[in-house]
């Protein structure tokens, strides 16, 4: 039902300089996989097949990553290293990738509007790949949100409780509680001044948006930081219709900050990488045992 996922990936990533001087933030590896690949896998799990990526200057490696690399593949063909390309090959084969360039970095709202040509007139998901979300015990965050969309048929933003001292870094919502994890949004403030935040529910980088959001963004002037803010457009949408905020199940790491990136790397190393390696080793052992038995 929601087939397209938009990845705004044109930002400068200044918090990670100098690493991001010539490398897109979204290509930074968490263990052995770039951030954006985690996001694409989450979208695939939620049933989306069309990945629309908003890029900017110096971001061509994003395109290369989701394409074949004939030279490399030929080089490792038939060797035990080929298995290392299994995941990305599967991902490339399972989805379509389209790219559009944001020529001027005028903010997240503007990046989403730039994606309009790729998305068209249908509801779509948005993933900010520098927010890495995992839910080892159940469905991924986007999948949880798609289920909610089927029920509510309006825009949905993922939110997380953060300490008051952190709210100034986020878009913060105010809402009527519908269920212990669901709120109908009544107000939203982008990066509120300390002490003025309407709640401690911060919007993180997962959205389901209905296509009328594009018209709201078009009518939105530059806001906080001189940027066109998606939060301002969402507030208009909430005032004229409905926007739901959802306290998702799982964990989210802010990989746009050095601390969050380090946490994510440690977490994924222990909970994904080592576990996968363990399974692969067990499989290899079983295959050897079967071979010996014959
Ligand atoms: P951030 O607020 O994290 O900005 O953008 P940034 O430039 O990437 O990073 P810092 O703060 O300078 O370190 C949130 C998301 O919106 C995208 C970014 O790529 C990121 O995924 N974005 C932001 C755009 O695509 N275009 C923009 O003009 C601004």
Image: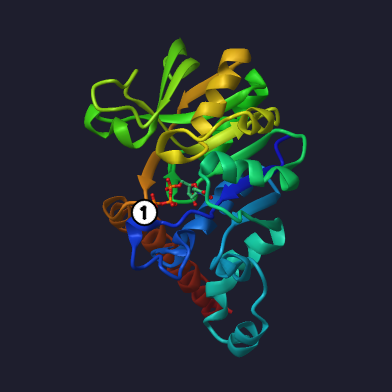
Q: At which x and y percent is residue 228?
A: 52, 38
Q: Is residue 260 left or right of residue 289?
A: left
Q: At which x and y percent is residue 173?
A: 42, 22
Q: Is residue 81 left or right of residue 266?
A: right
- For the N terminus, the quadrant is top right
- Above or below 89: residue 251: above
Q: Is residue 104 left or right of residue 92?
A: left
Q: Nearer the viewer, residue 226 or 124?
A: 226
Residue wearing tag 1 = 271
- Above or below 115: residue 64: below
Q: Nearer the viewer, residue 268 or 242?
A: 242
The yes-or-no answer for disc 1 within 8 Å of ligand 1 is no
Q: Nearer the viewer, residue 141 or 59?
A: 59
- Above or below 66: residue 262: above
- Tell me where residue 5 sits by quadrant: top right
Coloured how? rainbow
- For the C terminus, the quadrant is bottom right
Residue that extends furthest to the bottom in the rendered view of this protein? 75
- Tell me where residue 225 sits by quadrant: top left
- Tell me where residue 167 sits by quadrant: top left
The residue that appears at 64% across and 68% down in the rendered structure is 89
Q: Is residue 37 left or right of residue 249?
A: right
- Above or below 51: residue 32: below
The residue that appears at 53% across and 46% down in the rendered structure is 106
Q: At which x and y percent is residue 261?
A: 33, 55
Q: At which x and y percent is residue 67?
A: 66, 70
Query: Can residue 46 be seen in this snapshot?
Result: no
Query: Can residue 242 be seen in this snapshot?
Result: yes
Looking at the image, how many numbered discs can be counted on the residues?
A: 1
Q: Secondary structure at mark 1?
A: helix
The residue that appears at 51% across and 27% down in the rendered structure is 232
């Amino acid at each position: 039902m929601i087939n397209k996922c938009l990845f705004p990936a044109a930002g400068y990533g200044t918090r990670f300089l100098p690493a991001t001087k010539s490398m897109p933030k979204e290509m930074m590896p968490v263990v052995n996989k770039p951030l954006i690949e985690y996001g694409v896998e989450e979208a695939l799990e939620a049933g989306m097949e069309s990945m629309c990526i908003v890029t900017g200057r110096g971001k061509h490696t994003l395109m290369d990553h989701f394409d074949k690399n004939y030279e490399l593949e030929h080089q490792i063909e038939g060797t035990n290293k080929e298995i290392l390309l299994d995941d990305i090959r599967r991902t490339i084969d399972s989805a379509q990738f389209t790219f559009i360039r944001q020529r001027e970095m005028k903010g997240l709202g503007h990046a989403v509007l730039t994606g309009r040509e790729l998305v068209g007139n249908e509801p779509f998901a948005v993933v900010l790949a520098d927010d890495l979300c995992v839910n080892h015990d159940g469905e991924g965050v986007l999948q949880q949100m798609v289920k909610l969309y089927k029920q509510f048929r309006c825009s949905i933003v993922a939110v997380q409780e953060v300490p008051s001292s952190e709210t100034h870094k986020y878009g913060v919502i105010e809402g009527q509680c519908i269920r212990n994890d669901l709120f109908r949004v009544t107000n939203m403030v982008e990066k509120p001044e300390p002490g003025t935040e309407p709640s401690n529910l911060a919007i993180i980088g997962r959205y389901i948006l209905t296509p009328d959001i594009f018209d709201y963004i078009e009518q939105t002037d530059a806001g906080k930081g001189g940027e066109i803010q998606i939060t301002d457009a969402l507030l208009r949408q909430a005032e004229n219709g409905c926007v739901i905020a959802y306290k998702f199940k799982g964990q989210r790491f802010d990989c746009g900050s050095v601390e969050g990136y380090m946490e994510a790397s440690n977490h994924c190393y222990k909970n994904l990488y080592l576990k996968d390696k363990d399974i692969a080793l067990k499989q290899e052992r079983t295959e050897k045992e079967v071979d010996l038995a014959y």
